[in-house]
Image (cartoon, grey):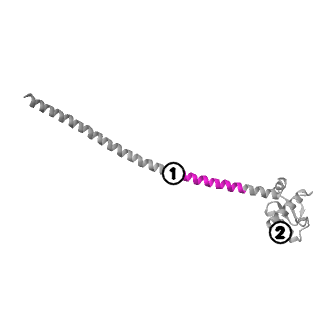
Amino acid sequence: MIEHQDDLNIEINLRIICESNDKYEFHLTDFVDKHNRQLSSKYVSEKFASLMEREGLIRISGDFCSVEKFGIKVFNSGGWLKYLSNQEKQETEIELSTKEKENLVLENLKLQNEAAEYQKSIRGLESQNRNLTRDNLRLENWDIRFRWYIAIGSFIVGFVLEFIMGK
């Protein structure tokens, strides 16, 4: 809640500084709270000014401050609260895109794993195919030899029969 209070005070005081006649010499005691009352003490004003300086909105020089280019840019783009809202949206978008990227990386890894398993199974099937081809060639060679043996045996039997029958 205090953070939101500071954001509201930053919004109000940034508007006051940027709308003042002299943006480059604003007295630290001129800061106000959300009810447009001056801040309670010089210490509170200095602490608040240092908060705005940490955010890059102003630069403190002694008891005075001047608005920075970033402060003017924030004011012109709609104020501190709108700037914070835009930052939050950007962070959410970045977070979503990061999550989407992580999901895509995980999906890519899964697909690569599936591709590796598929390649492994293809190698196994190719090995089986080579073995079957080799076995098929052996059977064909055996079949050719067997037919030659039958042909030669038939020729010899025929020749022997012819010789026996011819006498």
Return the residue found at the far top. Answer: 166
- Quick one: label 2 or label 1, which is nearer the N terminus? 2
Q: Which quadrant of the structure image shows residue 68?
A: bottom right
Q: Position of residue 11 (x, y in %)?
A: 85, 60
Q: Position of residue 86 (x, y in %)?
A: 77, 55
- Secondary structure beneath dot 2 equals helix
Sort mark 2 into few (<14), some (14-19) or many (20+) by Cα contacts within 10 Å.
few
Q: Amino acid at mark 2?
A: Lys
Mark identifier at residue 47: 2
Image quadrant holding the N terminus, namely bottom right
Q: What residue do we see at 41% from left, 46% from top?
A: 126
**Foreground pick, 9 / 22:** 9
Q: Amino acid at mark 1?
A: Glu
**Foreground pick, 127 / 12:** 127
Image quadrant holding the C terminus, namely top left
Q: Position of residue 14 (x, y in %)?
A: 86, 59
Q: Which quadrant of the structure image shows residue 40?
A: bottom right
Mark identifier at residue 148: none
* Residue 91 in the figure: left or right of residue 133: right
Q: Which residue is disc 1 drawn over?
A: 114
Return the residue found at the far left. Answer: 167
Tell whether position 103 is magenta: yes
* Residue 162 in the figure: left or right of residue 77: left
Q: Position of residue 33 (x, y in %)?
A: 88, 66
**Foreground pick, 82 / 70:** 82
Magenta stretch: give its range: 91-115
Return the residue found at the far right. Answer: 21
Asked if residue 48 is positioned above or below residue 71 in the image, the reply reads below
Residue 24 in view, yes or no: no
**Foreground pick, 65 / 106:** 106
Question: Disc 2 or disc 1, which is closer to the eye?
Answer: 1
